[in-house]
Image (spheres, rainbow, N blue to C red):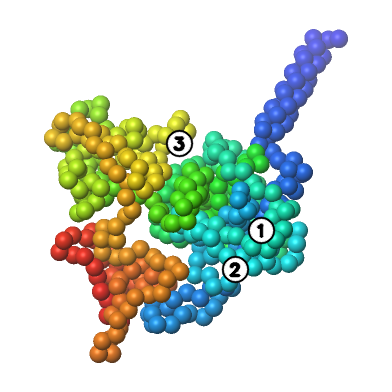
Amino acid sequence: MTAAGLVATRRWLLLSAVLVASSLLILTGGAANAQTSDEIREIEDSIVKIYTTTADPDYFTPWRLMNPNQSSGSGAVIEGNRILTNAHVVANASYVQVQKNSDPRRYLARVEFVSHSSDLALIQVEEPGFFDDAPPLEIGDLPDPNTEVLVFGYPIGGRTLSVTKGVLSRVEQQVYAHSGEFLLAGQIDAAINPGNSGGPVIADGEIVGVVMQSAGGGRTEALGYFVPTDIVRHMLTDASDGQFDGFPDLGFRTQDLESPAAKARYGLAEDETGVLVIKVFEDSPADGLLQANDVLLSIDGYEVAGDSSIRLNRDLQTNYKHAIDVKQIGDTVPLRIARQGVAMDVDLTAQRRQQSYSLVRSEEFDAIPDYYIYGGIVFVPLNMNLIKRWGSDWTRTAPVNLLHARSQWSSPEKREVIVAL
């Protein structure tokens, strides 16, 4: 063989080895997260379609209901013969039915527990034997970024169960569209469409989240958000006594503290980080323990960065509020603060957020509006239900004075806003 032929042969052998190695890497790398057809079929038996009939209150004429509306969502069977879904799937529902993947019959269901703040709900079906062929899915831990996940649900465009593959791209605090809460959420590169809501996000055969909304209000293609299992477990613990408590609020507000000059102004060394306390609400857990101009250095053992973030692990950095969100009402939350350059430890008791923290009530569900008629004028408390009555583009179309009140904190002089319709 000539020298040129020998070189060509070596190149061919080297290329073949690289291709084989690459193929093995792809196969073994995908096997860790891939679900077999049998495993997918077992999961499908635990997915249900949820049909609801709702009649929302009309906050422009609060004595009547709006026209009934029928919609659908998805859910998954979990331990205790319960179905896990989104709160917005069953909000204001007067009639709920569920349908199993392998059964065309619709079964009457009832809502057992709702956490509108976390956009999660639990449904029960009283029909004997309904859960016999619907094994409960386990709730797992949030996987690492770039993990392949499967999304199960019943999106619009068809009647049968849909399974979509995606990748967990990031986890951080997001505004939940249903409640307006700022909570931890996972982002996946899988399309989330109406009907998908409430369906499980699956990794390694376990629920790692609950689908809740598309990214950018539907303006972004093939991106969606889900409620991670940290929030799901918080809701399940809350539901254990049958009474809704929700997420705690310690009753103080902060702003970022990143400027070296500002840090020095409040007594921080160059290597210290924290955020500035700018508001302490009256009669809150922080009242009498924190003061304006204190610097929050750490919370529950997590150091607080100047941009308000904490690092939970190597891959997850998020807003320090998450350290409060995972607590139950009555839990102790240890803080380390600096006051005029002197560090000190403070323990606060987690309590429910008081309505008095804001001039504008948060959005209410499954409730009849309050109103009062005097001299032919209708008076109602200002809440987000009324503001959102101006449509999906309410941030632009609602009256400016109502939106301005939404950005104001309460005080002893300002307690509530009443609107005359």
Identify the residue position indicated by label 2 in the image.
Answer: 96
Disc 1 element? strand
Q: Which mark is residue 48?
A: 1
Q: Which quarter of the picture shows residue 193?
A: bottom right
Disc 3 element? loop
Query: Residue 59 location, x and y as percent?
Result: 39, 77
- Give the side of residue 290 with respect to residue 69, left or right: left
Give the residue at x 41% y 74%: 368
Q: Which quarter of the picture shows residue 275?
A: top left
Residue furthest to the bottom in view is: 375
**Screen quadrant of the C terminus:** bottom left
Amino acid type, residue under disc 1 in the picture = Val
Amino acid type, residue under disc 3 in the picture = Leu
Q: Nearer the viewer, residue 193 or 92?
A: 92
Pointers 2 and 1 in contact (C-beta within 8 Å): no
Disc 2 element? strand
State the count of labels: 3
Relative to 279, say whether 307 is above or below: above
Q: Is residue 195 visible?
A: no
Amino acid type, residue under disc 2 in the picture = Val
Give the residue at x 55% y 63%: 111
Task: Tell me the distance, in whole angstroms, between the alpha carbons under discs 2 and 1.
Answer: 12 Å
Give the label, 2 or 3, closer to the camera. 2
Task: Tell me the distance, in whole angstroms, between the alpha carbons under discs 2 and 3.
Answer: 37 Å
Q: Is residue 413 visible?
A: yes
Comes first in the chain, label 2 or label 3: 2
Identify the residue position indicated by label 3 in the image.
Answer: 316
Give the residue at x 44% y 76%: 57
Give the label, 2 or 1, closer to the camera. 2
Query: Residue 91 location, x and y as percent?
Result: 50, 66
Q: Nearer the viewer, residue 9 or 111?
A: 111
Comes first in the chain, label 1 or label 3: 1
